Amino acid sequence: MKHIVKGIEPQAFEAWKGLASEDWHPDYAGLSGPAKKAVKTALMVEQGWICCYCERRLTDKDSHIEHFQPQSDPAVDPLDFSNMLCSCQNHVKKGEPRHCGNLKGNWFDEDLLVSPVDASCEGRFSFAGNGHVQAADSNDTAAIMTIQRLGLNISKLIALRANALSPFLDDSLTQDEFERFVHGYLQLNSSGMYGEFWTTIRSVFQ
């Protein structure tokens, strides 16, 4: 789980909310068109185009706006941009395992769910060369529960992480080439994207 630094809400979203009047009140169900697109794009950009939970590559078709604290909670403002993230998986295909925001659903416990907005989140998980993830501290109940509730150790994600690790295990790389490879992978590319499974690569190789 990579730390996400939240930015300010996009102007189009702010302007849309500013249209509120006695006859119309903005709500999440009514968020659509350019305002919703602006929100989703802003979220993907601030996350470097990787899922807020598993760090798969985000695409517009295979992602959704995620409320960290579920909007089903009456105490939550569904239009609070600071509570919004972008998770992978939009519509789950039949037979496809659910994970991340889709699996989390409306579950939330502030003491048992690690937030990607928390600056300490990256250090609370460790990764093995075979793609498995576990709590960095075996006594960290929240990290353990987060892995379970988000499905971060399902076979699909384990295989994808192992695949992301494999290019770095090339024996033909010199030490200098390897170090430059790792360093380069952990930087934003020219399109403002982080490499998939950023935290896995950093944890295992750096």
Image (cartoon, rainbow, N blue to C red):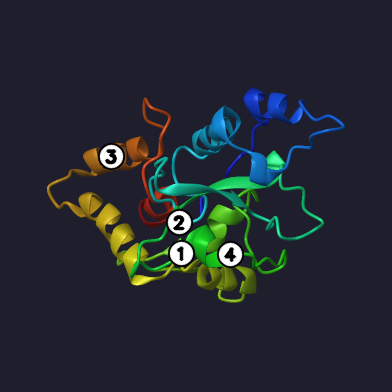
Between 55 and 121, the residue placed more toward the observer is 55
Give the Cα distance between marks 1 and 2: 9 Å
Task: Give, as a three-letter code, the residue at label 1.
Answer: His
Circles 1, 4 touching at the beta carbon (< 8 Å): no
Measured in 3D between alpha carbons, the distance from the residue under mark 4 to the one under mark 2, in whole angstroms, is: 15 Å
Q: Where is residue 165 drawn, in percent x and y?
A: 28, 55
Image depth: mark 1 or mark 2 in front: 1
Distance of label 4 from label 3 (alpha carbons)? 37 Å
If you read the primary sequence from the N terminus, does the residue marked by circle 2 or circle 3 appear first?
A: 2
Nearer the observer: mark 4 or 3; the answer is 4
Please state if 173 lies on the left or on the right of 185 as rendered: left
Question: What's under tag 3, amino acid-wise?
Answer: Phe
79 to 66, vertically: above or below: above
Contact flag, marks 4 and 2 (Cβ < 8 Å)? no
CA gap, disc 2 and disc 3 = 22 Å
Closer to viewer: mark 4 or mark 2: 4
Label 4 belongs to which residue? 105
Horizontal side of residue 206 vs 116, given as left or right: left
Which residue is at the front of the view, 62 or 6? 62
Residue at image mark 1: 99
Above or below: residue 108 compared with residue 181? below
> Residue 166: x percent and y percent?
23, 55
Residue 91 sits in quarter? bottom left
